[in-house]
Image (spheres, rainbow, N blue to C red):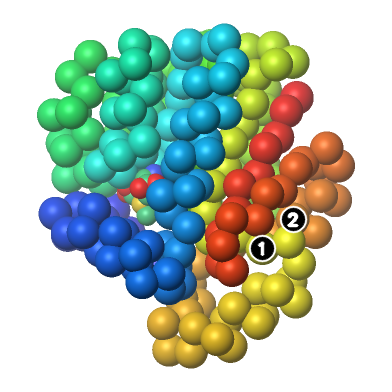
């Protein structure tokens, strides 16, 4: 699994490698643009204006909201990713923080209309994911606010197994992809939209 230094090294080539996997429709980024596009539309079709981006990376998605006038908060543990995102969004509140420890103290007294997390939550094991999602839900501003998670994701463990077999040596054993049937036990109202053979979007409300 990549640590913060691994992501530092990946930061320069990140946008390119994501685009390549997306264009070739291969694991892990098949469906990437659709995931970001659909999350973008969901937020734009609602009225809230304050967004927290978990693991914002180079800021591909949050920059779009930033340009539309949204107030952007974010956490990421890679200095280089933060540098790149800060260049694009100088007025955003972007904090260096490892989300294995939950949210930073300075965000705990804030509420957000949307919390978005794309291709980052798979760094947490299932029990850590559930704990973190619970914390994120408590930071949503009201009952219309949403947590939107886009990632390599599956409806069932069986579907994930099929993808693993199909991906061969490319499959990353050190990542813990979110699976609807597992998360449903902790979050009965979670919704999953499948986007490609290896990706999808979870919507969670309070
Ligand atoms: C694959 S990139 C996704 C970036 C962006 N959200 C996107 O969709 O393109 C994962 C990001 O999550 C960050 N990340 C991974 N594990 C993290 C952790 N434990 N705490 C904070 N950030 C983390 C990485 O530094 C990286 O910027």
- Image vertical order of residue 176 relative to residue 42, above or below: below
Query: Could you tell me which residue is drawn at 75 percent across and 76 percent down?
Result: 158
Of residue 134 and residue 72, the one placed in the foreground of this image is 72
Disc ID at residue 154: 1
- Image vertical order of residue 1 relative to residue 72, above or below: below
**Residue 87, position as x, y percentages in the image:** 13, 29
Q: Is mark 2 within 8 Å of ligand 1?
A: no
Task: Answer whether residue 13 is visible to the viewer in this image.
Answer: yes
Answer with the quarter of the image where residue 88 lies.
top left
Answer with the quarter of the image where residue 10 lies.
bottom left
Which quadrant, please, contains the N terminus?
bottom left
Which residue bears the numbered disc 2? 180
**Residue 66, position as x, y percentages in the image:** 31, 20
Query: Could you tell me which residue is drawn at 31 percent across and 43 percent down?
Result: 57
- Image vertical order of residue 202 relative to residue 4, above or below: above
Q: Are marks 1 and 2 in contact (CB under 8 Å)?
A: yes
Query: Could you tell me which residue is drawn at 31 percent across and 59 percent down?
Result: 18
Query: Could you tell me which residue is drawn at 45 percent across and 42 percent down?
Result: 36
Answer with the quarter of the image where residue 132 lies.
top right
- Image vertical order of residue 131 relative to residue 135, above or below: below
Of residue 12 and residue 1, the one placed in the foreground of this image is 12
Which quadrant, please, contains the C terminus?
top right
Counting labels gives: 2
Few, some or many C-alpha atoms within 10 Å of disc 2 (few <14, some 14-19, many ≥20)?
Answer: many
**Residue 149, position as x, y percentages in the image:** 57, 43
């Amino acid at each position: 699994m990549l640590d913060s230094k691994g992501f530092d090294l990946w930061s320069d080539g990140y946008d390119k490698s994501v685009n390549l996997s997306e264009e070739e429709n291969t694991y892990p980024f098949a469906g990437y643009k659709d995931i970001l596009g659909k999350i973008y539309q969901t937020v734009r079709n609602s009225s809230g204006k304050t967004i927290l981006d978990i693991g914002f990376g180079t800021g591909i998605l949050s920059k779009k909201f930033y340009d539309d006038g949204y107030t952007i908060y974010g956490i990421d543990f890679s200095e280089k990713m933060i540098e790149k995102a800060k260049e694009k969004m100088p007025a955003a509140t972007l904090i260096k923080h490892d989300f294995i420890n939950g949210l930073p103290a300075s965000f705990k007294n804030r509420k957000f209309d949307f919390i978005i997390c794309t291709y980052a939550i798979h760094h947490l094991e299932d029990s850590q994911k559930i704990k973190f999602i619970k914390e994120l839900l408590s930071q949503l501003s009201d009952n219309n606010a949403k947590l939107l998670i886009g990632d390599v994701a599956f409806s069932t463990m069986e579907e994930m197994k099929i993808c693993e077999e199909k991906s061969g040596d490319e499959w990353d054993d050190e990542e813990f992809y979110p699976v609807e049937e597992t998360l449903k036990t902790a979050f009965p109202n979670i919704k999953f939209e499948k986007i490609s053979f290896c990706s999808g979007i979870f919507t969670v409300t309070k």
